[in-house]
Amino acid sequence: MTGLRDELHLLARQAPAVDLAERAVRGARRRRRIGLYGSALATLVAVALGATVLAGGLLGGAEQGTISGRVTDVLPTSGVDPLAYAYYDMCGVKWTPGKNTGEFAGKDCVQWHVVTRTGQNFRMPEALSFYTDQSEQNYMNTAAPVAITPDGRRIAYYSEKDQRFAVRDLASGDVRLAPQTVSRATMVTNGGLLRLSPDGRHLGLYGFGGLDAVVDMDAGRVHEIPAGWHVHSVPDGGSPVVLVNEQDRYALLIDGQARPFAAADVARQVSELAPDGRRVAYLTGGTPGLTSGGAQKSRPDDTIVTVDATTGRILSRVRIRDEAERFPSWRIGGWRSPTEVVVSAAVIDRSWTASRTGRPVEGRVPTLGETAYALDVTTGAVRRLRAYTFRGWSGDIVLPGF
């Protein structure tokens, strides 16, 4: 992950004073938005692209502290350090969906920005971002997606100039274009998400008006997905692909067929395949759950479950240690090690409000973003990795491997 989103299907469980949901789950799949409206925090974190982690991979080097940085220039053509995250911040101005969208047209601050692990912050104008031509009817589809490999060395995006999806190697500057042509109008009308394999070779396309496929970006080959399914994640080598359908059911793509491994009630989102190529993990335990039916959770998930994706058998079910109560929302990404998956929670900044009234303090702009954690699927232990933030009233953030 853009990001979204990214399918954790999470709306702010804290107390959304406005209904951000285009039936929440469907909107979450289309795009991830983090925003503050009026006096309430309204956070929409969508599709999380888990990415299998090689040694030192997912969010590598992102231990403790917070990453943020000032914009210095346009992204250089080559020689860029690995990325920590990508974001756009809506110029730090309050955005009213479907109302003042056109006011942002042509502004640099609604472009995607990328922040390196060394703290450099660059604009990336070649990557289409916020849709300034959206309407009041389709405002939930807020921006063209990006995805970053777990090692931060490659980024996938929509190139409006080429009308194609692209994968760029940040060090060498090499750019590979997918063979399919997609118009901006299709992007704005339908939305979609990108799934990038850990090595950056295979790009999964989800949505975009029915453009569901896995593209080998080196060879230019397109592998179609069975009708009714979408690409959830793609491993190195391009197989086996994890699929998801509109009923929140997950499957492996094997020999051109979708083989479901989880019941429809399992998950808002499962992780990437583990390094063993068999296990996936998901979070559960909150009640009653934010699902396609629109039910709102009353508390966070508190249990991590692992499943053998080749058989559908549950392998483990572990209660998350204490930390569960500190997470108002979760996303689940790839595996940091054979026993740890990376999860994230929305950054909730209450410093911009007056303690007594809960209303915004004049002149203060909130901090938005996500905090990443490593969650041990065998013990339930949680380790804080790092917070990734920007200042603004709304925008989007994408972490490597999500």
Image (tube, helix red, strand yellow):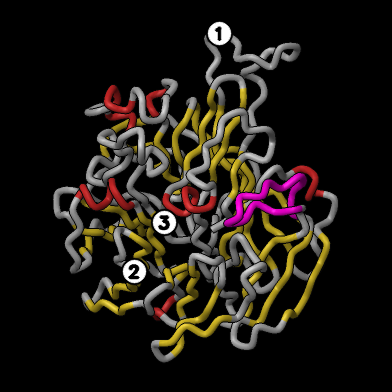
Instruction: Tell me the residue that label 3 is attached to.
Output: 148
Give the main secondary structure, helix, strand or loop, of the magenta stretch: loop
Calculate the distance from the C-alpha at mark 1 to the C-alpha at mark 3.
Answer: 36 Å
The x and y percentages for residue 72 are 33, 31
Q: Write down the region rendered in magenta.
A: 288-301
Instruction: Assess whether residue 296 is covered by the magenta stretch.
Output: yes
Residue at point 65%, 83% (across, down): 312
Residue at point 34%, 69% (across, down): 212
| Camera sees residue 178 | yes
- The disc placed on residue 362 is 1
**22 versus 379 height, above or below:** above
Name the residue type under label 1.
Glu
Disc 1 element: loop
Name the residue type under label 3.
Ile
Along the viewing direction, whichever of 36 and 168 lies nearer the viewer: 36
Instruction: Tell me the residue that label 2 is attached to.
Output: 212
